[in-house]
Image (cartoon, helix red, strand yellow):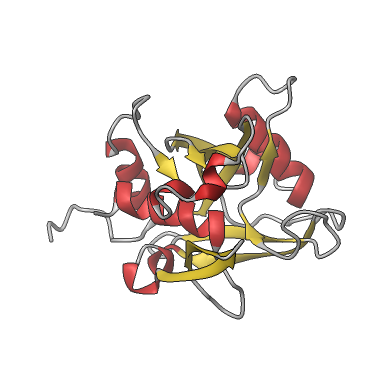
Amino acid sequence: MDQMSPTPFSAEDFRARVAAQPLAHAADDYGDHRFNPGHPRLKLAKALRDAAVLIPVVDHGRDATVLLTKRAEKLRNHSGQVAFPGGTIDPTDPTPEAAALRETFEEIGLGQDRIEIIGRMPDYVAGSGYRIAPVLAMVRPGFSLALNSDEVDDAFEVPLRFLMDPANHGRESRMWDDLEWFFYEMPYGGQRIWGVTAGIIRTLYERLYT
């Protein structure tokens, strides 16, 4: 490897890969349907609701990490699931980036002074009926989090090196109205990263690391 190249899975390397990623096009087609082509569940979805999530890569130098949350068990939808900070785009949010930043602060208390937006992935369509804008960001370490207990039970970091290793991308499935629904799963440190979150991580890998 060229001595001047950034160390793989470092914050510098991630930033360079984001800058060099292919331009997003309207024809880009990412989402749960890629893993479940023709599944009846997808045909039942109503009009898509717009949402945004932050993919916060923490700048630990040579060994960057990704900050994830565990949704509160008391939530009605997707309770206890591992997720990126984010949520529905409100009418008052001028951009998906603004929505992702607002939701991140509301959920875990991570302020914009620690976050640098560096790009965005193409939208990811979830089988649950959301069109999700994944916003890519670098986070300056040394932060303190203030978890909103109504929304989040935990927040934790996972090495970027682990998430971008396809050997850790397991294919799993479960039954949905007697039909099999496929998804990715990436267990780490006692946490189960799966579903839409794992699908977005897989998409990130496909765009930046293949």
Q: 47 and 5: which one is in front?
A: 47
On the image, which quarter does residue 177 sit in? bottom right
Q: Position of residue 17 (x, y in %)?
A: 30, 45
Q: 135 and 179: which one is in front?
A: 179
Locate residue 70 relative to residue 158 in the image: left or right: right
Q: 24 and 62: which one is in front?
A: 24
Q: Position of residue 104 (x, y in %)?
A: 69, 44
Name the residue at 74% across, 52% down.
108
Name the residue at 65% across, 49% down.
85
Furthest-bottom residue in view? 190
Q: Position of residue 32 (x, y in %)?
A: 48, 50
On the image, which quarter does residue 161 sit in? bottom left
Q: Could one spot residue 111 in this view of the protein?
A: no
Name the residue at 64% across, 37% down.
100
Image quarter of the C terminus: bottom left
Name the residue at 33% across, 73% down.
167
Q: 37 and 169: which one is in front?
A: 37
